[in-house]
Image (cartoon, rainbow, N blue to C red):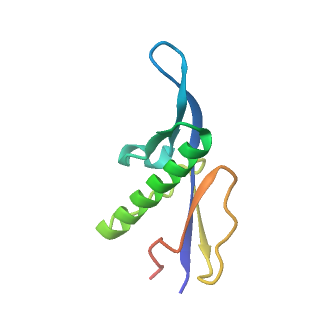
Amino acid sequence: MSMKTYNFKVVVEPDQDFDGNPSGWHAYCPALKQAGGATWGATREEALKNISDVVHMIVEEFIEDGTPLPEGPLDSVQVEEVSPELPSDAWPSTIGVWGLGPPDN
């Protein structure tokens, strides 16, 4: 049985407060933004860790609810068939979710 690997593009960018002063980092996943795929962190590394956690939580919720995972747009999501033994390489600046996609029937 094969599984799918989903690599989600994420964007991490400096954030500002209302006065234009630096104020941490904003991170979001374009393909999952409507499902709440956005967060922040005090540092770039914290924002990247937080968006990784958010993406994994959303994917797990989609699977539990039987909601199909987004497979596009192509510049935001890469879907590959993979062997269950080893995940494929992830795109740079993406968050990979291995073995969580629904198996092919």
96 and 17: which is toward the camera: 17
Kindly identify the residue that appears in the image at 41 percent across and 59 percent down. Answer: 57
Relative to 90, is 52 on the left or the right? left
Viewer-side residue, 96 vs 44: 44
Left or right of 83: which side holds 26? left
Q: As displayed, is residue 58 above or below residue 98?
A: above
The answer, for residue 98, to whether it is visible in the render is yes
**Image coords of residue 66 (percent x, y):** 32, 68
Q: Position of residue 73 (x, y in %)?
A: 53, 49
Residue furthest bottom in the image? 1
Q: Quadrant for residue 67, please give it.
A: bottom left
In this rendering, the count of numbered labels is 0
- Residue 65, how many percent across, how many down? 29, 66
**Above/below status of 88 relative to 32:** below
Residue at the (48%, 79%) spot, across then down:
104
Q: Is residue 8 above or below residue 24?
A: below
Residue furthest to the left? 65
